[in-house]
Image: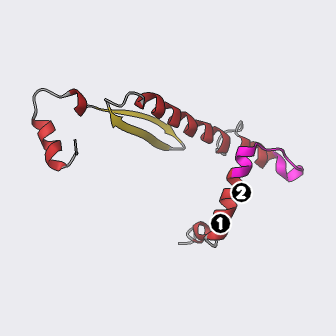
């Protein structure tokens, strides 16, 4: 079913909801944002897939946040000035992607700070 404005208003006017009209929302707060997955109730694996995606967001926050002493980035920030530090392959790959984006955009994100 296509969910345009008229269909939405018709759904509101019905006294008996149809099972396929229900939507599930799975959400979690991370990185000072609300992350949400929305899918039709009829999607059998929806909750499991949404939970897996939100768990990945939590994992990334745990690795990258500077607001937790236990994060890998906090570890690097504390120790890299005094010598080489060993980091995970996933953090290394992420830093490489960030460096490449910085170069490809001529530092576009940093040039916006002064505005």
Query: How many numbered marks appear?
Result: 2
Q: In the rendered image, which quarter contains the N terminus?
A: top left
- Residue matched to label 1: 102
The stretch in magenta equals 79-93
> Is 57 above or below relative to 82?
above
| SS of the residue under disc 1 | helix
Residue at (71, 57) in percent of width and height: 96
Residue at (35, 36) in percent of width and height: 39
62 relative to 5 in the view: left or right: right
Counting from the top left corner in percent of width and height, residue 4 is at: 20, 49
Q: Is residue 87 magenta?
A: yes
Residue at (47, 33) in percent of width and height: 49
* Distance from Cα at disc 1 to Cα at disc 2: 10 Å
32 relative to 26 in the view: left or right: right
> Is 107 above or below relative to 26?
below
38 relative to 86 in the view: left or right: left
93 relative to 79 in the view: left or right: left
User: Which mark, by number, is residue 96?
Assistant: 2
Counting from the top left corner in percent of width and height, residue 12 is at: 14, 37
Question: In the figure, residue 75 lies in which quadrant?
Answer: top right
């Amino acid at each position: 079913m296509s969910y345009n404005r008229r269909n939405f208003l018709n759904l509101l006017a019905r006294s008996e909801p149809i099972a396929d009209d229900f939507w599930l929302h799975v959400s979690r707060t991370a990185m000072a944002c609300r992350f949400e997955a929305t899918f039709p109730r009829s999607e059998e694996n929806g909750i499991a897939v949404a939970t897996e995606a939100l768990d990945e967001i939590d994992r990334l926050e745990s690795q990258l946040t500077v607001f937790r002493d236990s994060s890998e980035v906090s570890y690097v920030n504390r120790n890299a000035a005094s010598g080489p530090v060993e980091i995970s392959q996933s953090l290394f790959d992420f830093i490489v992607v960030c460096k490449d984006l910085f170069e490809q955009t001529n530092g576009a994100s940093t040039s916006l700070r002064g505005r």
